Amino acid sequence: MYDNILVPVVFDHGERAADSLRVAKELLNEGGKITLMTVMEEIPAYATTYLPEGLALRHHKDAENSLNEIANDVDVPVEAVVIHGHAYSSILEYSKTHDTDCIVIASHKPGFEDYFLGSTAARVVRHAKCGVHILR
């Protein structure tokens, strides 16, 4: 169905990343590409002076390693990408600049705060220029 699928994940959602990746695999055309991505929030400049040297780089590498572990569970090629920024805007920008034709994203059960701010998945659905599959 799709040739270029983006699977954004949040590590504190447990098995949701693996579930999203399995769904993406089912939606992928033969010879297609899956990108497994996580977005790390930017650390404010004033706070970086208080952090141990190299901490941000270690967290980036840990995130890459975690994505690669998740990607090992499927038998199709998966590219692991770690980017920095705000979650929903980074997902949308990445999908636009990399010609993504589908985003597979897990969503949590909406809470009270989501009615005012909106969840990342809800914002992606509203603004994506490609197909979006939501897992609940």
Image: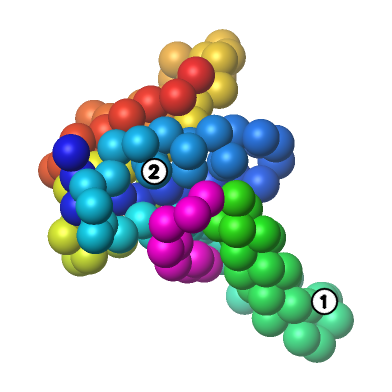
Residue 37: x %, y % from top left: 47, 57
Residue 70: x %, y % from top left: 62, 53
Secondary structure state at the residue bearing disc 2: helix
- Locate residue 2 relative to residue 33 in the image: left or right: left
Residue found 36% across the figure and 56% down from its top: 34
- Label 2 sits on what residue type? Lys
Quarter residue 120 falls in: top left
Residue found 29% across the figure and 37% down from its top: 27
- Locate residue 3 relative to residue 47 in the image: left or right: left
Magenta segment includes 3: no
Magenta segment includes 85: yes
Closer-to-camera residue (70/62)? 70
Q: Is residue 3 above or below residue 80?
A: above
- Disc with the residue nearer the chain's start (1 vs 2): 2
Residue found 35% across the figure and 36% down from its top: 26
- Label 1 sits on what residue type? Tyr
Residue 38: x %, y % from top left: 52, 56
Quarter residue 97 falls in: bottom left
Closer-to-camera residue (113/67)? 67
Q: Nearer the viewer, mark 1 or mark 2?
A: 2
Residue at numbered disc 1? 50
Numbered tag placed on residue 129 in the rendering: none
Residue 66 appears in the picture as rendered: yes
- Locate residue 6 relative to residue 117 in the image: left or right: left
Residue 44 appears in the picture as rendered: no
Residue at numbered disc 2? 25
Q: Which residues are magenta?
A: 74-86
Q: Outermost residue, bottom direction? A: 53
Residue found 18% across the figure and 39% down from its top: 1
Residue 47: x %, y % from top left: 72, 70
Secondary structure state at the residue bearing disc 1: loop
